[in-house]
């Protein structure tokens, strides 16, 4: 049987549909969430250049990266910096788990990114 699929952005619009689909296929899932471990979820906190992905990646052979900043609010002073922190630096951090590139990670068969890289 295939290993687990890590889904970032699992609570978002696309992520919810993907979780439902893969669950229906019987695939083992792990969902990276901001807070609250349990029921297949692993808390990673806010996504950015310092996110620790180690626990979320344990036993995973596929990553579907959907998490990303999708909107801004009027209260934000530098929206572009926030987009870059989450969407670009956070994605780069996931692809470069400390000391190794995900593609070289033992057991990882594929990684897909569908988040914006603003």
Image (spheres, helix red, strand yellow):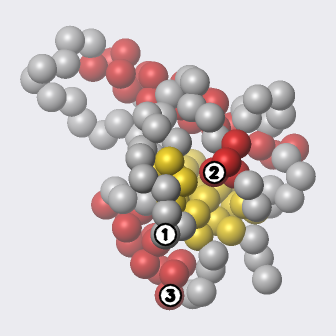
Residue 70 location in percent, x, y? 30, 40
According to the image, label 2 marks what residue? 56
Compared to residue 95, the image places residue 103 above or below, namely: below
Task: Judge left or right: residue 48 versus residue 94.
Answer: left
Question: Mark 1 and mark 3: span between their CA atoms?
Answer: 16 Å
According to the image, label 1 marks what residue? 39
Of discs 3 and 2, which sits in the foreground? 2
Of discs 2 and 1, which sits in the foreground? 1
Q: Earlier in the sequence, mark 2 or mark 1?
A: 1
Q: Quadrant of the N terminus?
A: bottom right
Query: Which quadrant of the structure image shows residue 28?
Result: bottom right
Nearest the eye: 32 or 104: 32
Marker disc for residue 24:
3
Question: Mark 2 and mark 1: span between their CA atoms?
Answer: 13 Å
Q: Earlier in the sequence, mark 1 or mark 3?
A: 3
Residue 38 location in percent, x, y? 49, 63
């Amino acid at each position: 049987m295939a290993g687990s699929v890590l889904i970032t952005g699992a609570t978002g619009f696309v992520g919810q549909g993907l979780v439902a689909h893969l669950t229906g296929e019987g695939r083992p899932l792990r969902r990276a969430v901001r807070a609250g471990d349990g029921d297949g979820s692993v808390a990673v906190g806010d996504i950015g250049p310092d996110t620790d992905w180690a626990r979320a990646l344990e036993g995973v052979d596929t990553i579907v990266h959907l998490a990303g900043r999708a909107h801004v609010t009027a209260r934000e002073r530098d929206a572009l910096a926030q987009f870059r922190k989450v969407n670009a630096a956070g994605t780069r951090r996931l692809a470069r788990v400390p000391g190794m590139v995900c593609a070289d990670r033992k057991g990882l068969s594929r990684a897909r990114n569908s988040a914006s890289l603003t």
